[in-house]
Amino acid sequence: MRRLFFLLILLSPCSLFAEDGSQLWLRYTPVDKHMVQQRTISLQAKDQTAQLAKQELEKYWRGSSISLRLDKKIKKLRDGYQIKGDGTGVEVVAAKPAGLLYAAYHLLRLQETETDIEHLDIEEIPDYDIRILNHWDNLDRTVERGYAGYSLWKWDELPKQLSPRYEQYARANASIGINATVLNNVNASPQILTADYLEKVKALADVFRKYGIKVYLSANFSSPKVLDGLSDSDPLRKEVQDWWKAKVKEIYQHIPDFGGFLVKANSEGQPGPQDYGRTHADGANMLADALKPYGGLVMWRAFVYNPTEEDRAKQAYQEFVPLDGEFRDNVIIQIKNGPVDFQPREPFTPLFGAMKNTAQMIEFQITQEYLGFSNHLAYLAPLFKEALDADTYSEGKGSTVARVTDGSIFKGKRTAISAVANIGEDMNWTGHHFAQANWYAFGRLAWNHQLSSEDIANEWIRQTFTNAANFVTPVRQLMMDSREAVVDYMMPLGLHHIFAFDHHYGPEPWGDRKGGRPDWMPWYYHNADTIGLGFDRTATGSNAVSQYYPPLDSIYGNMASCPENLLLWFHHVPWTHTMKSGRTLWAELCVHYDRGVQCVRTFQKTWDKLEPYVDTQRFKEVQSKLKIQAKDAVWWKDACLLYFQTFSKMPIPYELERPTHELEELKKIKLNMKQHN
Ligand code: BDP
């Protein structure tokens, strides 16, 4: 009987063990008793985080004995570690308990990816001090731009009941080096700072602490007025300052290692210091002063823009650069990777490197608000890398966004990197099995921004699915091609923000709302007319190019030297303009849209062939999502090409797939995807 069972496993391993994705990349199997007797895991430290490192290894490690050691003197390691293995045993040293935990996960990662686990000479020091997720979770458990179900945080049940997923969440984050989390939406409800909610926040912080994770909160700038009836929330008024001081004291009584506040102020209708004629620096500094005695930080967002005559892409720079040097040293300006808004492709925000006396951090979006929600497969490491590796030229060549934010160019500041989470209550955490890879990739890049997208995909695939080369190689290729495919079928050549109003899922390049803000309308961004397409951001247009350091200003500002993948971001280009391929702009646009569609069809073919390597449930779920993606890609292509064709009046090159929709029919589509915000 037993034999038959093993035979069955060998013949059909996948269908026997359906997986739901809930284990993420942490699919370790416990070692048996025999193995436990063969090797020892030793540790001289009582700390609970260090103990956790030991427990994880005791349960799952299949290699030789390990000694874990804390040595506070090796300060250069920060929360990193050293691992040495000579074939007879492994030695791990860290300066902080969290370092031992990260080392434990490093060892398990090597084991799970079938890498040598005995001969080791590793030193890992994280690139950023704070590696933080931003949850856009509301207190009613809806998640703004969340596509994986309701919020993980069950506020009604807290603080008494603790869902087991809180600990699983913390463990998953620790396994990739994430050490901080903002629990609530940047469009913050003041309620989060009430005594009742602080009890709940404390309960979560108590679970996360063991995993080295600090809790932060988004603060609503009007909290003093809304919660306690102060006449206003003017940051220069003593009563307001005292209110925040008392509030911060109360928070630290509950959570002694509280991280600090994330603030969205004077942006998209949120309150802020400008309501009282004060500056962003006045607002941020008031909070920073309250947090300072406890070592807390303010992450103050630069995502600000107003419906003025000025190009939206220029506004953050214009508001923040004049304030350089005015912020307290426990304030970090949190800047989105692109100057408009988490589009499938944007240039980097020119504010990076332009405030030399102010700490800056990048904000990515893991949740796919603009990349097909949790329906489309889009591996985002290449997007993250594109921004981090972009050269700002702020201190000459080589001043990449990564280097102007990681402390290597501007010294003496605490460094941080953030991303908006894609996590919800869904069994597989992220809605799409492959969206787990984006959470994973953010953590890995926050730890080491020099890792390659391929290597991160490789280790994720091996841990999440299988080490079989016949699976790993094609899936890695699929992942590597996926973000560019989305760009191609949605917004190639630098097009941006031509989404349907509000939900940002489907195409609506024709979109217009009477009386609506122009900077929320697709025509504002694409400017299609009988002459051409694109936003003129050169000196003849909004001159946003002037915000970039030389030589970028002229590279971007010149149609001939501007990278073609950003051409329509910076230029209004005639339909007949000759592209590098020799095609006209119009034909090139058609080729890109078509390529995006064909690429998704290839993903389907690749995936279907891999059925023998994947458990049934995950195979089918990914297969279904790819079907949606393929349909959506055609929808995007037809909508954009048919609409832009009404201006270009040129034929879609005859060798390309023909549209299958009527433009008028597409214009009638209304999706019921209203956001709860
Ligand atoms: C936009 C989202 C909106 C967010 C805003 C932000 O559409 O829901 O509140 O960004 O980052 O992308 O504050």
Image (tube, helix red, strand yellow):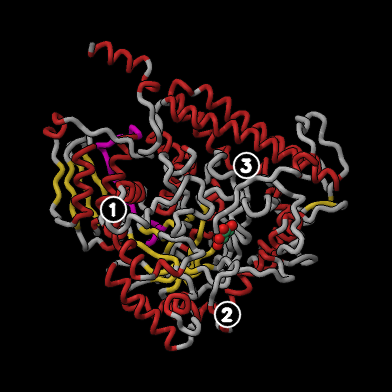
Drawn side of residue 52 relative to residue 143, left or right: left
Compared to 322, does 62 lie above or below?
above
Indicate which disc residue 275 carries. 2
Q: Please state the extent of the stretch shown in magenta in the rendering.
A: 113-132
First-in-chain label (2 vs 1): 1
- Cα distance, mark 1 to mark 3? 41 Å
Depth check, front residue: 604 or 244 = 244
Instruction: Report if residue 613 lies within the magenta region.
Output: no
Q: Quick check: is 131 in the magenta stretch?
A: yes
Q: Residue type at mark 3?
A: Val
Q: Which of marks 1 and 3 is nearer the N terminus?
A: 1
The dot on residue 348 is: none
> x, y (%) of residue 109?
33, 40
Q: Nearer the viewer, residue 584 or 650?
A: 650
Q: Mark 3 points at which residue?
A: 486
Residue at screen point 55% across, 83% down: 278
Badge 1: few (under 14), some or many (20 or more) residues near its Cα, within 10 Å? Answer: few
Location of residue 482 (image quadrant): top right
Label disc, if present, on residue 161 of the rendered structure: 1
Residue 428 position, x and y percent, is: 42, 39
The answer to whether residue 581 shows anywhere in this view is: no
Q: Residues within 10 Å of mark 2 (few under 14, many from 20)?
A: some
